[in-house]
Structure formats: structure tokens, C-alpha cells
Amino acid sequence: MLDVQKIRKDFPILNRKVNGKPLIYFDNAATSQTPQQVIDVIVDYYSNYNANIHRGVHALSQEATDAYEQARQKIQTHVNAKHAHEIIFTSGTTHGINLVANGFSSLLKEGDEVIVSALEHHSNIVPWQMLCERTGATLKIIPMDDNGDLILSELDTLLNENTKLVFVNHISNALGTINPIEDIIDKAHNVGAAVLVDGAQSCPHLKPDVQSLNVDFYVCSAHKVCGPTGIGMLYGKEEWLNKLPPYQGGGEMIAEVTFEKTTYAGLPHKFEAGTPNVCGGIAFGAAIDYMNAIGFETIAQYEHELLEYATHQLQQIEGVKIYGTAKKKTSVISFNVANIHPYDIGTILDKMGIAVRTGHHCAQPIMDFYKIPGTIRASFMFYNTKEEIDTFITALKKSILMLS
Ligand SMILES: *Cc1c(COP(=O)(O)O)cnc(C)c1O
């Protein structure tokens, strides 16, 4: 059982007021809040051992390097990667995807095919479009149905010997659908294609096992798992990371430099040019520790209760239509109310201290599918409560009255 009142004490931001009302934070799919345990790690870093890493012989540099590499190992253990050097620190999911897309520029040619799903975030669409433009490869789409599930049978007709890459998110940020990535990975591997899974929305709710998934690349952002912004990770299978060329040139990523020729450093440094976000990496590790201490099974179970509770309450309100009704979904509810614009409801909710997201959620193709401009999205984390949902429902009813 999860002791939510005890957990809430870890998050100082949950004590603040917004527009004179206690904050109710339901925009967790955009970014999660940070517990004191992680804030303390950040303060400790800058108070006691801030230094550049991998370079200095002095004590601070050693301490910072050790902590940074320990964080890499924590993430390795967390996602069950075979080697620590298969974990590349990035600035976030978007950076990880671009790193891989850029690397594949030199491996693709005209006639090759790349598949993405209809449920993607823009950051998992645009880099592949750019990749296809550069290489002459063709982009194909796995379609979705009304529930917000991918139509997996269509994937069989899209896959062929020209397919080189398949990209899909583990969980959709706009609808919360949990995609059957195990099947997608198997099917893609059967034709020899590599698979990148965008785990930005899954890592806050479950513990991925990259070896048992047999996935080639897996990316996520720390700021969605109770960590800071500006840091994330790319897992890549060793053989793939060795095949891809470096993304950026600079310090840290080289073995030897002369004006005639430069040789690159081994993994993971080949992909970590320049001074990295040292503090961010260490805090990312602390965030993973924090969530593991609560336990991902406990988290998932509690969040599922919140999802069911809120879904049921919303369904009682006349005019509410929920988008994304897949059987397997996480604690994300996208909805609209009759003809009211989502932005208007979002604005009134904010006046009552309630933070939700409104708009297309960086997933315009999904909005186009439903022929809507956007939705209101309420997304829950383990520190949210049923009482907050009750307050939200009352506020929503009030805002509907004001707007109709
Ligand atoms: C948030 C998100 C991203 C982008 O993550 P950044 O941290 O902004 O790079 C990509 N994909 C999905 C599914 C997301 O939810």
C-alpha cells in the first residue's frame, strides 16, 4: 500500500498555492514534480563537489566523476542493460531520438523504409521526417483506431525487407495508451529492422527491461521521473552504438586529436561531447532511487486506481467525451466537454489552482485523427489523491456552467 500523505510531504511544491487555492498538479505527463531527496542531491552537488569530470586529478573532479558514473550504473541496473556503457546521458528524450536519427543518416539509402506509429509525439515524428529527407528513405505510419490503439495487423503489411527502422512510443503522452511494444519489436526484428522505443511516458510508471524486450534503442527524460530538466538517457545495444557515428564533435568524445585525423573515444564517451550535465546526471540517479524505494508495482497499482476513479467521475458529467479508451493505459485522461474550447476550461481551472494541459500535446496527428483542435489532459502521478480528483471534478462542473 502506498502512503500518499507521507509521500506528499516529500514534495515541497505541493504546499504552494496558486491563485489563492492549494495547487492541484495534474500536468504530470508534461513534467513531474521533484522530491526533496532529489533537490538535496542538487544542492549538495553545488555546495560540495561541483567540478568538471573525467579530466581533473584533483579530489573534487574525482568525486564528481564517481558520482556521475555511479548514476550511470544506477540507470543501467534500473533498465537492466547489459553494460553501463550502453547508457548514454543526453539532454532528454528529444536529444536521444535526434542522436539516433542522425546516426542512421549514414546507414540509410533511397528505397529504405522507416516506420513510425500514428500515436507519436512530434519529437518522434519530425527527426524521422528529417532523416528521410536527407537519405531518400520513405516514412510509413502504423495506423490507430478510435480507442487509441495501434492497428497491429497493419504493421504486418508495412514491414518488408526494405524496412530498416521502426519507432514507437511505449506509452502515448496524448492518450495514455500502452503500446504492445513486445510484438512490434519481434515483428520488426523478423525483417531485420532496428527498433527505437520512446520511453518518455513509460519510465514514470513502469520499469523497462531492455534485455528482455530485446529493444535496440530506448530513450527517456529525467524530468518526467521526478528528476531535473535537461537530462535524460539513451540506451543502445552495444553493437548498434558501435555502428553509429558520433553525433557531435568536441571534448570528452575523442581518443586522440591531430589536425590530420581524430580517433573517437569508446562508449559511452563517443556520444557525450563537451562538459555534460554532471549535476543533472547525479540527480537523475537519485530520482530513480527515490521511485524504486516506493516501488514501481505499488506506483502502477495506485495510479491505476486514480485513473479508474477519475474516469468514472468524468463519465458522469454530461457532454464529456474521453479520447483514448484503450484497455491498457496509464493515468492520462484526454477529454473535451461538448463544444467548449479546451483552452477556456483550462484557464478557469487554473484560476482555481488546478494545473491541466490543454492543446494538441505535441501530437497533432492524433488530434487530426479525431478531428479536434485539442483536448484537456489530466495526468496523475503517485503523489496525487482522490480528494484532489474530487476538487477537480467540482471545479470542472463549475467551469462548464460558466461557459455554457
Ligand atoms: C515528453 C515527451 C517527449 C519529449 O521529451 P523531452 O523531455 O521534451 O525531450 C517525447 N515523447 C513523449 C512520448 C513524451 O511524452
Image (cartoon, helix red, strand yellow):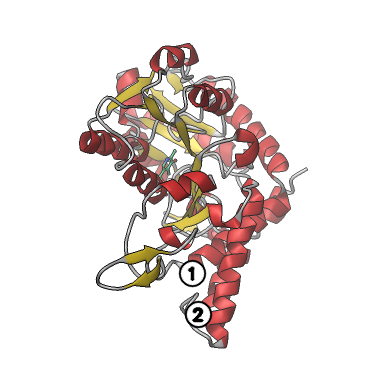
**Residue 174: percent from the left, percent from the top?**
43, 32
**Residue 192: percent from the left, percent from the top?**
47, 27
Residue that appears at 51% across and 45% down: 239
Residue 50, labelled with which disc?
2
244 lies above or below 181: below
Say which residue label 1 marks: 278
Residue that appears at 59% across and 63% down: 71
Q: Which amino acid is tagged 2?
A: Asn
Q: Quadrant of ligand 1?
A: top left
Residue that appears at 39% across and 29% down: 164
Residue found at the far bottom of this picture: 58
Mark 2 C-beta to ligand 1 under 8 Å: no
Q: Which amino acid is tagged 1?
A: Val
Residue 135 falls left or right of residue 23: left
Evaluate if marks 1 and 2 touch, with contact meaning CB atoms under 8 Å apart. yes
Residue 304 falls left or right of residue 129: right
Structural crowding at the residue carrying mark 1, measured as other residues with C-alpha within 10 Å and reported as few (<14), some (14–19) or many (≥20): many
Residue 234 falls left or right of residue 342: right
Residue 28 appears in view: no
